[in-house]
Image (cartoon, rainbow, N blue to C red):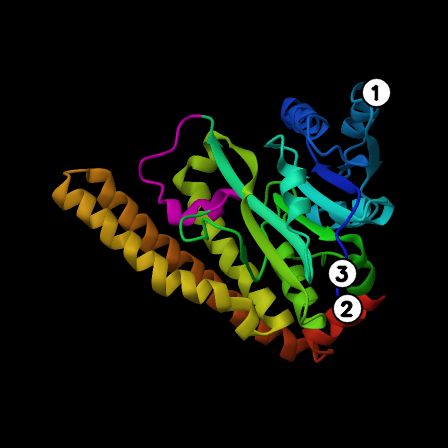
Amino acid sequence: MPSISAPGAFSVVICAYTLARWDELVACVESVRQQTLPPREIIVVVDHNPALLERVRAQIAGVIAIENKEPRGLSGARNSGIAIAQGDVIAFLDEDSAAAPDWLARLRAGYTDQVIGVGGAIEPVWLNGRPRWFPPEFDWVVGCTFLGMSETPTRVRNLIGCNMSFRREVFQQFGGFTSGIGRVGTQPVGCEETEFCIRARQRSPQGELLYDPRARVYHRVPPNRAAWNYFRARCYAEGLSKALISRLVGAQAGLASERAHTFRVLPRGVVRGLADACLRRDVMGLARASAIIAGLALTTAGFLIGAISGMIAARQRGAMPDRLALKNSADG
């Protein structure tokens, strides 16, 4: 990809699926309206919920409200927004998040040289307070920036879905988000943005993705997502998703960042938790250390089961390799 000029207007895509988050959706839209760099358009994509779509059109003025034209799920909803967006850059927010006033301005400043996508920090807003057992190294479980990520602007392998943006031409050249990977409703799966980022980088080796923690959004974390049952399910589902990603883009690219986090960040987290328990008499330090170990074990188990299941399914169907199927889907 040749050298790219700085972008002009932004389209902001907000995906929504439930009336239960109506107040959060209204607040999210308002945070985009208050940007110091106003967007060209705000697109609200409703995921197969006619009642919610009707209410958005009736009660939220100044937005483009459309339905998800693809199969149910976050990938299809994002793709539906991409299909009608007119901005030079398309930025994405979750409906239960709110952007800082300089969010778009910070994102735009990152588009220099070969940068094809810019994302930023996602700060959790714990509605019932942060559980003391919940290790910050696992804040990705609730879709937020986690301990171990850079505190200064840096090039990264992939951006996080709740706070990411890409040049529109990237989607035109490399296709959209792949259905069958990302979240559908409340199912605790993900990684569709990881697969897309890796695919874009593989097809455009000169293209770069920038993470700038100064471009901030705030993500609400309800009590059910601060519970052990959700933590356990999300870790296991992440392993399943990473197995699928590895089949699509290759294990080297699919697991590079995870290896670094596992071998560099998580051991320090365990040691810190044990030190808190032994030296500071903080019993929750032991709980945090245990949660790190359990979370890693659950994610690994999900990955192994997903990898084995994928190999068995591939042998049974005898169809084209997943990577070739993905290429055909994206090119089409």
Name the quadrant containing residue 135: top left
Q: How many marks?
A: 3
For the residues marked 3 and 2, what is the alpha-carbon distance in whole angstroms? 6 Å
Residue at image coords 64%, 76%:
314
First along the sequence among labels 2 and 1 = 2
The reply, left or right, for residue 120 in relation to residue 40 is: left
> In this rendering, does residue 190 appear at all?
no
Question: Residue 100: x, y in percent?
Answer: 59, 32
Residue at image coords 69%, 43%:
92
Name the quadrant containing residue 67: top right
What secondary structure is found at the residue carrying circle 1? helix
What secondary structure is found at the residue carrying circle 2? loop
Residue under label 2: 2
Asked whether the beta carbons under mark 3 and mark 2 sit within 8 Å of each other, the answer is: yes
Residue under label 3: 4
Magenta region: 128-145
Q: Is 240 above or below relative to 71?
A: below
Comparing labels 2 and 1, the label whose residue is closer to the camera: 2
Residue under label 1: 58
Indicate yes or no whether the magenta region holds residue 137: yes
Q: What is the three-letter code of the residue carrying label 1? A: Ala
First along the sequence among labels 3 and 1 = 3
